[in-house]
Amino acid sequence: MAMIGFIGLGNMGGPMARNLLKAGHKLRAFDVVKANLDAVVSAGAVAAKNAADAAKGCEIVVTMLPAGEHVRSVYTGEGGVIAAADKGSLLIDSSTIDVESARAVAAAADKAGFAMLDAPVSGGVAGAEGATLTFMVGGPDAAFQRGLPILQAMGKNIVHAGAAGNGQAAKICNNMILGVAMIAVSEGFLLAEKLGLEAQKLFDIASKSSGQCWAMTSYCPAPGPVPTSPANRGYKAGFTTAMMLKDLTLAQRAAAAAGVATPMGALAQSLQSLNAASGQADLDFSSIFKMLRGTK
Ligand code: NAD
């Protein structure tokens, strides 16, 4: 069992840290919000005073922070993890951040002699609680093999996507596909409604035809056909519009930096930005159907 430093104990990091404790690991935990730290300390972690204090004396350091700027500051800022961690520690960042920050922090870690993995997740809070997350991992093979048992205590599907930053690349490409698909499915169901074709009938046909996709069959944005989809509980998230907008924006930044045209991704980002501004930022991202339909 390992001694692990865990930094960032919010909606995702809190339950992930608790699953490491359940698996028998020892944790030094830190969060800037005391209530979030207290919740993990009451599950058995030792409270650290700051990020550096959480990293000291640990074989592995895991971070689960909001965005690239937090990750850069926690690892490379003054009193950061890279300056404080024990020699030979493995660093794992599971936050969803921009590819550029992930690669910059991994390079700084490498320069200081640390192996680092970017290991963003999908599966949401339910996946974090149930230890069923999917991890998309970038970094050297030896580091991946070393981190695997730790990630397995928090998730179910762990995929090595290649070199540093490739975990983040996989995450934003997947979510850009989903973001575009959700809008396409919404438009299809909306047009059907206006043409007098019932949502259930379109579902019965399209879910067995070439229009079939996850956004339709598992998460249908039109109320009715998929009982478990957010559309049947007033679009309560799920995966919020704000979170989808964050990932679509990361995808657009990456596309601009790489000089790749992703016009459908750009339109999805713009439409979800409108959806958020119309007051639906905290609803599920499939509420885009409601916005396009023009109903409250
Ligand atoms: P959150 O805001 O609930 O948690 C982030 C935590 O980091 C907070 O507790 C905050 O206090 C802490 N924090 C911020 N700066 C810090 C610092 N300098 N030092 C220590 N702690 C600090 O966010 P979340 O929902 O847990 O998401 C975390 C990451 O996971 C994000 O990058 C998000 O995009 C990604 N993600 C979230 C979900 C989801 O459904 N919530 C799903 C997949 C991926």
Image: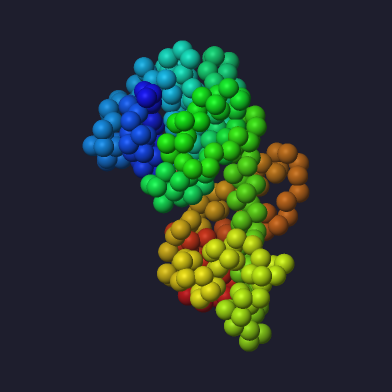
Task: Find residue 274 and report its horizontal and vertical position in percent.
Answer: 57, 62
Q: In the figure, residue 154 lies in which quadrant?
A: top left
Q: How is the image coloured?
A: rainbow
For residue 255, which quarter of the picture?
top right
Q: Residue furthest bottom?
A: 196
Q: Residue at 39% of width from left, 20% of height from top?
A: 58
Query: x%, y% of residue 207?
Result: 64, 69
Instruction: Locate residue 46 relative to residue 267 in the image: left or right.
Output: left
Q: Residue at x 69, y 67 (%)?
A: 211
Q: Residue furthest left?
A: 42
Q: Is residue 152 visible?
A: yes
Residue 295 at what x, y percent from top left? 51, 77
In the rendered image, is residue 105 in sight? no
Q: Is residue 219 above or below residue 75?
A: below
Residue at figure coordinates x 73%, y 51% from the top left: 262
Q: Is residue 125 left or right of residue 286?
A: left
Quarter holding the N terminus is top left
Q: Is residue 159 above or below residue 269?
A: above
Using the image as rendered, state which of residue 106 and residue 224 is in the foreground: 224
Q: Nearer the viewer, residue 30 or 130?
A: 130
Residue at point 51%, 58% (across, down):
241
Rendered location of residue 238, percent (x, y): 46, 58
Q: How many numbered circles does the render carry?
A: 0
